[in-house]
Amino acid sequence: MRRSVSKIAYIGACACVLSWSAQAATTAQSNLHVHMTVEESCTVGDADLDFGSVHDLSSERNAQATIAVNCANTGAYTIALDPGQGAGAAVTQRYMKLGGTDGAHQVSYGLFSDASRSAVWGDGTGSSQMMSGAGTSSFTVYGQVPAQSLPALGSYSDTVTISVAY
Protein backbone atom coordinates (compact mmCIF):
# COMPACT_ATOMS: atom_id res chain seq x y z
CA MET A 1 0.00 0.00 0.00
CA ARG A 2 2.85 2.25 0.66
CA ARG A 3 3.89 2.01 -2.92
CA SER A 4 0.40 2.96 -4.06
CA VAL A 5 0.42 6.09 -1.94
CA SER A 6 3.84 7.05 -3.30
CA LYS A 7 2.68 6.47 -6.84
CA ILE A 8 -0.44 8.53 -6.22
CA ALA A 9 1.64 11.36 -4.68
CA TYR A 10 4.04 11.23 -7.60
CA ILE A 11 1.18 11.26 -10.15
CA GLY A 12 -0.45 14.14 -8.25
CA ALA A 13 2.81 16.12 -8.25
CA CYS A 14 3.27 15.54 -11.97
CA ALA A 15 -0.28 16.70 -12.63
CA CYS A 16 0.43 19.92 -10.67
CA VAL A 17 3.57 20.58 -12.67
CA LEU A 18 1.75 19.91 -15.92
CA SER A 19 -1.05 22.20 -14.82
CA TRP A 20 1.45 24.95 -13.89
CA SER A 21 3.29 24.49 -17.21
CA ALA A 22 0.04 24.86 -19.12
CA GLN A 23 -0.73 28.08 -17.26
CA ALA A 24 2.75 29.52 -17.92
CA ALA A 25 2.27 29.04 -21.69
CA THR A 26 -0.65 31.49 -21.79
CA THR A 27 0.40 34.73 -23.55
CA ALA A 28 -1.02 38.15 -24.21
CA GLN A 29 -0.57 39.74 -27.62
CA SER A 30 -0.69 43.19 -29.08
CA ASN A 31 0.64 44.89 -32.21
CA LEU A 32 3.78 46.87 -33.01
CA HIS A 33 2.82 49.58 -35.49
CA VAL A 34 5.71 50.52 -37.76
CA HIS A 35 5.58 53.85 -39.62
CA MET A 36 7.71 56.01 -41.88
CA THR A 37 6.92 59.17 -43.81
CA VAL A 38 8.93 60.05 -46.89
CA GLU A 39 8.91 63.82 -47.28
CA GLU A 40 10.02 66.33 -49.82
CA SER A 41 13.26 68.08 -49.05
CA CYS A 42 15.60 70.54 -50.71
CA THR A 43 18.97 71.94 -49.81
CA VAL A 44 20.76 74.82 -51.44
CA GLY A 45 24.42 75.63 -50.92
CA ASP A 46 25.97 79.02 -50.31
CA ALA A 47 27.70 80.59 -53.28
CA ASP A 48 30.32 83.33 -53.54
CA LEU A 49 30.31 85.83 -56.39
CA ASP A 50 33.65 87.65 -56.33
CA PHE A 51 34.30 90.61 -58.65
CA GLY A 52 37.90 90.75 -57.44
CA SER A 53 39.97 93.84 -56.75
CA VAL A 54 39.57 96.88 -59.00
CA HIS A 55 41.43 100.14 -59.54
CA ASP A 56 38.67 101.82 -61.51
CA LEU A 57 35.14 101.14 -62.67
CA SER A 58 35.29 102.90 -66.05
CA SER A 59 34.20 99.63 -67.70
CA GLU A 60 31.93 96.83 -66.56
CA ARG A 61 33.22 93.93 -64.45
CA ASN A 62 31.82 90.42 -64.88
CA ALA A 63 31.92 87.40 -62.57
CA GLN A 64 29.97 84.21 -62.11
CA ALA A 65 29.19 81.68 -59.38
CA THR A 66 27.46 78.32 -59.12
CA ILE A 67 24.39 77.65 -56.99
CA ALA A 68 23.93 73.94 -56.15
CA VAL A 69 20.40 72.68 -55.43
CA ASN A 70 19.60 69.17 -54.25
CA CYS A 71 15.92 68.23 -54.00
CA ALA A 72 14.59 64.77 -53.17
CA ASN A 73 11.07 63.50 -53.72
CA THR A 74 9.89 66.73 -55.26
CA GLY A 75 8.62 67.70 -58.62
CA ALA A 76 9.81 70.90 -60.18
CA TYR A 77 11.13 73.78 -58.09
CA THR A 78 11.89 77.45 -58.66
CA ILE A 79 14.88 79.44 -57.46
CA ALA A 80 14.47 83.11 -56.60
CA LEU A 81 17.11 85.69 -55.64
CA ASP A 82 15.99 88.57 -53.44
CA PRO A 83 17.13 92.20 -53.96
CA GLY A 84 19.89 91.97 -51.36
CA GLN A 85 20.48 94.34 -48.47
CA GLY A 86 21.70 97.49 -50.20
CA ALA A 87 19.72 100.67 -49.50
CA GLY A 88 17.08 101.11 -52.20
CA ALA A 89 17.91 97.76 -53.83
CA ALA A 90 15.52 96.03 -56.21
CA VAL A 91 16.04 92.78 -58.10
CA THR A 92 16.74 94.86 -61.21
CA GLN A 93 19.30 97.08 -59.40
CA ARG A 94 21.29 95.73 -56.47
CA TYR A 95 23.93 97.47 -54.34
CA MET A 96 27.03 96.32 -52.48
CA LYS A 97 27.77 98.41 -49.40
CA LEU A 98 31.14 99.55 -48.11
CA GLY A 99 32.14 97.14 -45.36
CA GLY A 100 28.81 95.38 -45.92
CA THR A 101 27.05 97.95 -43.71
CA ASP A 102 27.72 101.51 -44.94
CA GLY A 103 24.73 102.44 -47.09
CA ALA A 104 26.21 105.87 -47.86
CA HIS A 105 28.87 104.24 -50.08
CA GLN A 106 27.56 101.70 -52.57
CA VAL A 107 28.49 99.98 -55.82
CA SER A 108 25.64 98.94 -58.11
CA TYR A 109 25.57 95.47 -59.66
CA GLY A 110 23.20 93.05 -61.34
CA LEU A 111 22.55 89.30 -61.25
CA PHE A 112 21.53 87.41 -64.37
CA SER A 113 20.54 83.90 -65.40
CA ASP A 114 22.29 84.01 -68.78
CA ALA A 115 25.88 84.55 -69.94
CA SER A 116 24.88 87.55 -72.07
CA ARG A 117 23.59 89.18 -68.87
CA SER A 118 20.26 90.18 -70.35
CA ALA A 119 17.83 88.09 -68.21
CA VAL A 120 17.67 89.52 -64.68
CA TRP A 121 17.55 86.74 -62.07
CA GLY A 122 15.24 87.84 -59.30
CA ASP A 123 12.02 86.87 -57.59
CA GLY A 124 9.66 87.21 -60.55
CA THR A 125 8.78 90.83 -59.84
CA GLY A 126 9.33 93.56 -62.40
CA SER A 127 11.20 92.21 -65.38
CA SER A 128 13.07 89.58 -63.35
CA GLN A 129 12.94 85.85 -63.89
CA MET A 130 13.30 82.87 -61.60
CA MET A 131 15.13 79.70 -62.56
CA SER A 132 13.52 76.28 -62.37
CA GLY A 133 14.74 72.72 -62.11
CA ALA A 134 14.14 69.26 -60.67
CA GLY A 135 16.28 66.87 -58.64
CA THR A 136 19.94 67.78 -58.23
CA SER A 137 21.14 70.63 -60.41
CA SER A 138 23.73 73.39 -60.57
CA PHE A 139 22.83 76.86 -61.76
CA THR A 140 25.22 79.57 -62.84
CA VAL A 141 24.50 83.09 -61.68
CA TYR A 142 26.16 85.74 -63.84
CA GLY A 143 27.06 89.00 -62.11
CA GLN A 144 27.93 92.36 -63.59
CA VAL A 145 29.13 95.61 -62.08
CA PRO A 146 28.33 98.27 -64.69
CA ALA A 147 30.67 101.15 -65.41
CA GLN A 148 30.25 103.81 -62.71
CA SER A 149 32.14 106.39 -60.72
CA LEU A 150 34.81 104.97 -58.46
CA PRO A 151 33.41 104.92 -54.91
CA ALA A 152 35.28 105.36 -51.64
CA LEU A 153 38.14 102.91 -51.17
CA GLY A 154 37.39 99.72 -49.25
CA SER A 155 35.72 96.34 -49.47
CA TYR A 156 32.12 96.24 -50.72
CA SER A 157 29.69 93.36 -50.17
CA ASP A 158 26.06 92.36 -50.17
CA THR A 159 24.06 89.30 -49.13
CA VAL A 160 21.38 87.98 -51.47
CA THR A 161 19.00 85.32 -50.18
CA ILE A 162 18.53 82.27 -52.42
CA SER A 163 15.02 80.79 -52.04
CA VAL A 164 14.00 77.41 -53.45
CA ALA A 165 10.22 76.86 -53.64
CA TYR A 166 9.09 73.26 -54.13
Image (cartoon, rainbow, N blue to C red):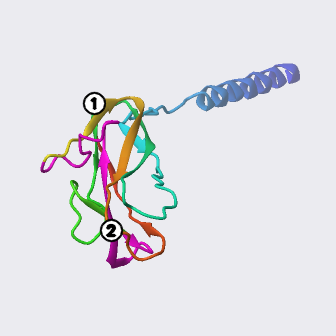
Figure quadrant of residue 10: top right
* Amino acid at dot 1: Ala
Q: Which is nearer the eye, 9 or 45?
A: 45
Q: Secondary structure at mark 1?
A: strand
Asked if the magenta segment contains residue 106, the reply would be: yes
Give percent across and percent down for residue 134. 34, 29
Q: CA distance from mark 1 to mark 2?
A: 42 Å
User: Position of 14 compared to 114: left or right?
Assistant: right
* Amino acid at dot 2: Ser
Q: Residue 149, labelled with which disc?
A: 2
Give the residue at x 38% y 69%: 150
Q: Which is nearer the eye, 42 or 62?
A: 62
Give the residue at x 14% y 50%: 125
Asked if the magenta segment contains residue 75, the reply would be: no
Q: Residue 161, labelled with which disc?
A: none
Q: Secondary structure at mark 2?
A: loop
Q: Is residue 66 above or below residue 110?
A: above
Q: Is residue 68 above or below residue 12?
A: below
Give the residue at x 40% y 38%: 140
Q: Which is nearer the eye, 30 or 9?
A: 30
Region in magenta:
97-126
Give the residue at mark 1.
76
